[in-house]
Image (spheres, helix red, strand yellow):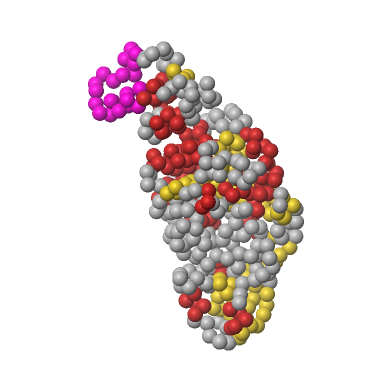
Amino acid sequence: MKKSSEGRDMYKWAQDLYPICRSLTGSGVRKTLNYIKDLIPDLTVHAIESGENVFDWQVPLEWNIKDAYIEDEDGHKIIDFNSNNLHVVGYSEPVDLLLDLDDLQKHLHSIPSQPNAIPYITSYYSQNWGFCLTDKQRQSLKKCKYHVFIDSELKNGVLNYADLVIKGQSEEEVFLSTYICHPSMGNNELSGPVVSTALAQWVKALENPYYTYRFVFLPETIGSIVYLSKHLEHLKKNMIAGFNVTCVGDDRCYSFMPSRNGKTLSDKVGKHILKSIDPEFKKYTWLDRGSDERQYCAPGIDLPVTSIMRSKYDEYPEYHTSLDDLSLISQKGLEGGFNALLRCLEAIEFNCFPKALILGEPQLGKRGLYPDTSTKESTDAVRSMMDLLSYSDGSLDLVEIAEIINTPVWELYEIVNNLVTHGILDSPKDQV
């Protein structure tokens, strides 16, 4: 594995990106994409103007924020955007008001069951404003006049997104999508972009890859809708597998979200890889969806996109709060998310429909493929080889065979290569 793909590097990227205030649009998104572009220079950043219609949606106004606070009558800032960018409801319009506590409470958000957490709240598509604070802070507010100030701007601007296409021998594509629209949160936001960046670096380093790989970095929901509105025909024609990359940074568990179809190559590969890494991984159904798989698998879109995660969004207590900070993710967790997706990309890249070229069982000894000394390790290796050969009639792909013989697919790559080299096996990419 390349050094740039190690957990410590991904964690450092997350640390650098963490302070940036991101939203659907604005300077925070551009700063984030420019940072990622420094790591993968071939990344192309695009802009689409506010107000453009994309399917049933419209690109929103661009939002930027400079400052925000709530100040008590003694001049003390009790809530300060500069101390935590989750303090302001996303897309809050500018305000400069003097309010009593009862009126202020109508614009405050907290979580009584998590008294030390600041919630993440947005109001993208309706004009509003608000502040988020811990419930402990909220309960301490005294009855007085409060100065409420938000220095923000909503204007006709652009929505930014970025993509990177790494050409392979084939026009068929493997697609990876991640989002860059959440402010300072670790697992639910930054783990996806940093792991995707590391995966892009890994693919870029491949020598002559078979498949073409497409990486996209965009704001959730509206960004994927924008991207589909521009590329749907191409994706439907060329995409063979896809992964929505999110929540891949903690080290509590592995999780799998299937496509709506449930039987795509992405589903087959994802479930096999996670079962091989962690037989206790959590399996969700399409009814548990909640991220951009909703857009990629929508009726009429029908792309083969699944999600491989650590702790799934909306299933861990820190989700969408200030508690989802850099302490929730770790080098080990990011490495685990990276490795799971890397195994998936390898499985797709090396997948084939093995076809035996010799009638009957081949004589392995004369080809140097049978060990001179029998040990448990050599016996297991020969068993895997013979099991693979016994199913190599060209009707099953390598992932299906790995499932049948209960062997991680990555343990079969070298075996296939040896059998092909010795003229025992053919390994076409398409079913015979």
Residue 197 visible in the displayed image: no
User: Nearest the camera: 430 or 25?
Assistant: 430
Q: Quick one: quadrant of the N terminus?
A: top left
The answer to which quarter of the image holds residue 229 is top right
Could you say where residue 212 lies in the image, as x and y percent from the top left?
59, 34
Q: Residue at x 51, y 52 (%)?
A: 288
Could you say where residue 419 lies in the image, as x and y percent from the top left?
41, 20
Give the side of residue 196 with respect to residue 295, left or right.
left
Residue 359 visible in the displayed image: yes
User: Is residue 264 covered in magenta?
Assistant: no
Could you say where residue 12 lies in the image, as x and y percent from the top left?
48, 53
Q: Residue at x 65, y 62 (%)?
A: 124
Give the side of residue 148 with respect to residue 252, left or right.
right
The span shown in magenta is 363-386
User: Nearest the camera: 87 or 60?
Assistant: 60
Give the side of residue 124 with respect to residue 134, left or right.
right
How many marks overall? 0
User: Nearest the camera: 420 or 283?
Assistant: 283
Q: Residue at x 67, y 41 (%)?
A: 232
Question: Against 220, is 266 above or below?
Answer: above
User: Is residue 365 covered in magenta?
Assistant: yes
Q: Residue at x 40, y 47 (%)?
A: 281
Could you say where residue 199 lies in the image, as x and y percent from the top left?
51, 42
